[in-house]
């Protein structure tokens, strides 16, 4: 059983993703199907792996290749963190202050209904 909850939801034994694609294939962009297929095979040793051998104890580990896809919750995490780091360096190079305002309980209804 796969530990990735999103992968278990999409690609369960009942074939929900495949049924969805079959039903709505004319409305799904080809890139979405491609990314989902990459996600489906992510971390599967049948798609290739590295062999790591410990020089001390000679323990052998197989490390499966990752898909590096945008849809994959495992692979896209690193790209998201890198994007936020670059964004914080480029955009947030200004002096700023973080301020939290507390509204008195009696006035909260007025502020919550303000945008309506």
Image (tube, grey):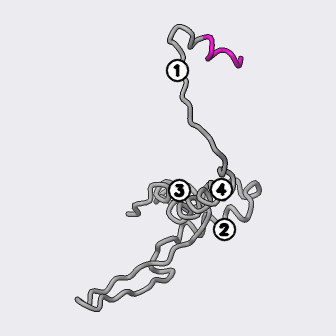
Residue found 72% across the figure and 57% down from its top: 28
Q: CA distance from mark 3 to mark 2?
A: 14 Å
Instruction: Please provide percent x and percent y for residue 46.
Output: 47, 80
Q: Which of marks 1 and 3 precedes in the sequence? A: 3
Q: Is residue 41 magenta?
A: no
If the image is split into quadrants, where does the C terminus sit? Answer: top right
The residue indicated by pointer 3 is 10
Q: Nearer the viewer, residue 105 or 102?
A: 102
Which mark is first along the chain, 4 or 1? 4
Of badges 4 and 3, the one in the foreground is 4
Which residue is rendered at x = 56% and y = 66% of the image?
Answer: 39
Identify whether 26 is placed above or below 52: above
Q: Which residue is mark 1?
A: 102
Q: Are marks 4 and 2 in contact (CB under 8 Å)?
A: no
N-terminal of the pair, mark 2 or mark 1, is 2
Q: Nearer the viewer, mark 4 or mark 2?
A: 4
Q: Residues within 10 Å of mark 4 (few under 14, many from 20)?
A: few
Magenta residues (range)? 110-116
Determine which residue is flagged by label 4. 87
Report the Cα–Cα distance between label 4 and label 3: 31 Å
Placement of 71 over or under 105, stated as above or below: below
Verify CB contact (< 8 Å) between mark 4 and mark 3: no
For this orientation, the residue located farthest to the front is: 95
Decide if residue 37 is on the left or right side of residue 31.
left
- The residue drawn where x is 68% and y is 15% is 114
Q: Where is 84 relative to 61, above or below? A: above
Circle 1 — which element? loop
Question: How far apart in space, not on screen, are marks 4 and 2 (Cα)?
Answer: 28 Å
The residue at which mark 2 appears reads as 34
């Amino acid at each position: 059983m796969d530990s990735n909850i999103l992968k278990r939801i999409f690609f369960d034994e009942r074939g929900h993703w495949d049924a969805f694609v079959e039903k709505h294939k004319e409305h799904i962009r080809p890139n979405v199907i491609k990314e989902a297929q990459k996600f489906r095979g992510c971390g599967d040793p049948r798609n290739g792996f590295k062999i790591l051998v410990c020089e001390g104890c000679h323990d052998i580990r197989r490390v499966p290749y990752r898909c590096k896809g945008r849809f994959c919750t495992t692979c896209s995490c690193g790209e998201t963190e890198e994007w936020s780091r670059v964004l914080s360096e480029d955009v947030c190079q200004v002096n700023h202050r973080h301020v939290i305002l507390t509204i008195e309980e009696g006035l909260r209804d007025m502020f919550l209904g303000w945008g309506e």
